[in-house]
């Protein structure tokens, strides 16, 4: 095949014939194209994409809240009409889906918090589980406050 | 138990073909063999033209990173028996240009790594007569995890963002920058922040998190990047203050 690390002339000729675009001793990199559907290759990628897409539900919920406040400012009649719309079956079903997306986004987002938040108490690093517990406790406390405000006062 | 196992290797021989092709080899099945042992058998006994990198065979040098059955792994630390009865599909690391067979081009990574100054930067060196820079065990513990990186680039291969945005500096380089930022002897964090606060630095990362999952040394580059983002954001807010450094 080769003599002293170099291809013998007949070998050069046969390889050039195999791929005429190849120039001997000139690197020719292969640059693979990344597939458009790369995110279906691995479950972790699919979970990531779902997490990112469910942020649309977070945005929708924020806009919905602002619209509700805006409607409230337009008077009782306008607010009642808006409440009736929210109470209709198709909107309720849609908001059920939005709620599922919101919960998925919130849980996956909170679970990542210890990665970014390194808390130290004196010389010791607070374990990730405690950081998580703090986040979930704050979430539960905020939820309890809202529930109390809506029904318990 | 089978006496042999099939290894399918994604081959790219630029003098023969424009696109990579799969080639199958039958290698002896041994419980104690790693995937790298299988590749070495191919090279020694079946086809000497197979090209790949390896060196230490003990998970230290970081040379033998490849994609095996879709997962970026160190082939010297991955048993063939994990994939029995086979076939075992071996590909080059994803996201890098392929030079030949399983060998990828690392020049781009090396340039990116250099740009974050992965060494101790001092404003002013102390005279030798002052002795060495001492560290407490706590100061060592602050950065030790990130110092375990062996530049095997499995994290780059697992990162879809790196494959989609080739300008992204990438997980290992950022983790190594963080390693020096957290070193009590270092004074170069501001210089590194200038590079990493750019879009192709920290902000390209969308926290897929797979870089940390595949890291054979548990360096957790994803965590390093998120911590860096927190620090960069805090710096930016501080710069807005009247007494900030803007």
Image: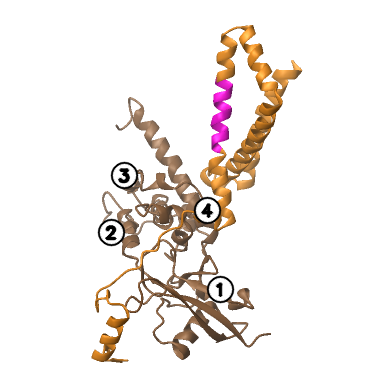
* Chain under disc 1: B
* Chain under disc 2: B
Q: Quadrant of the C terminus of chain A?
A: top right
Q: Quadrant of the N terminus of chain A?
A: bottom left
Give the residue drawn at x 48%, y 85%: B42
Instruction: Read off the magenta span.
Output: A55-66
> Chain A in the picture: what colour?
orange
Where does the image place residue A46, in percent across and percent down from the top left? 57, 51
Q: Is residue B131 left or right of residue A129?
A: left
* Label 4 to label 3: alpha-carbon separation: 32 Å
Judged by depth in the image, the label closer to the viewer, 3 or 2, is 3
Give the residue drawn at x 41%, y 81%: B50
Most frequent secondary structure within the magenta stretch: helix
User: Which residue is the site of mark 3?
Assistant: B194
Q: Is residue B225 left or right of residue A145?
A: left
Judged by depth in the image, the label closer to the viewer, 4 or 3, is 4
User: Which residue is the site of mark 1?
Assistant: B78
Where does the image place residue A141, in percent across and percent down from the top left? 68, 29
| Residue B119 visible to the viewer | no
In the picture, one chain is brown; tell me its letter. B
Q: Tag 3 or tag 1, which sits nearer the N-term?
A: 1
User: Which residue is the site of mark 2?
Assistant: B129
Where does the image place residue B212, in percent across and percent down from the top left? 52, 56
Q: Nearer the viewer, residue B119 or A113?
A: A113
The answer to which image quadrant residue B179 occupies is bottom left
Mark 1: secondary structure? loop
């Amino acid at each position: 095949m080769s003599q002293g690390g170099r291809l013998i002339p007949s070998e050069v000729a046969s390889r050039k014939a195999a791929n005429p675009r190849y120039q001997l001793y000139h690197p020719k990199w292969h640059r693979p194209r990344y597939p458009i559907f790369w995110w279906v290759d691995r479950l972790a990628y699919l979970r990531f994409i779902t997490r990112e897409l469910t942020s649309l539900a977070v945005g929708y919920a924020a806009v919905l809240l602002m619209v509700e406040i805006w409607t409230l400012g337009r008077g009782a009649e306008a607010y009642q009409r808006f409440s009736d719309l929210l109470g209709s079956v198709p909107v309720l079903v849609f908001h059920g889906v939005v709620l599922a997306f919101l919960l998925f986004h919130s849980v996956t987002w909170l679970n990542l918090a210890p990665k970014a938040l390194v808390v130290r108490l004196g010389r010791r690093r607070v374990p990730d589980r405690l950081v998580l517990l703090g986040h979930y406790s704050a979430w539960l406390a905020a939820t309890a406050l809202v529930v109390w405000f809506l029904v318990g006062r | 138990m089978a006496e042999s196992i099939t290894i399918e290797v994604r081959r790219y021989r630029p003098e023969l073909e424009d696109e990579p092709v799969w080639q199958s080899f039958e290698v002896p099945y041994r419980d104690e063999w790693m995937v790298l042992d299988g590749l070495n058998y191919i090279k020694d006994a079946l086809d000497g033209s197979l090209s790949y990198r390896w060196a230490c065979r003990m998970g230290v040098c970081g040379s033998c990173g490849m994609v095996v059955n879709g997962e970026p792994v160190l082939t010297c630390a991955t048993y063939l028996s994990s994939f029995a009865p086979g076939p075992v599909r071996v590909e080059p690391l994803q996201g890098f240009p392929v030079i030949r067979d399983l060998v990828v081009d690392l020049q781009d990574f090396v340039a990116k790594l250099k740009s974050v100054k992965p060494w101790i930067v001092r404003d002013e060196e102390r005279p030798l007569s002052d002795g060495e820079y001492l560290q407490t065990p706590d100061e060592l513990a602050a950065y030790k995890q990130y110092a375990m990186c062996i530049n095997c680039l499995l994290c780059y291969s697992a990162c879809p963002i790196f494959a989609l945005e080739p300008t992204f500096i990438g997980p290992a380089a950022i983790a190594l920058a963080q390693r020096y930022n957290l070193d009590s002897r270092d004074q170069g964090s501001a210089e590194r922040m200038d590079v990493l606060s750019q879009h192709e630095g920290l902000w390209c990362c969308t926290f897929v998190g797979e870089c940390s999952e595949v890291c054979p040394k548990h360096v957790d580059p994803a965590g390093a990047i998120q911590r860096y983002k927190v620090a960069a954001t805090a710096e930016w807010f501080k710069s807005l203050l009247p007494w900030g450094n803007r």
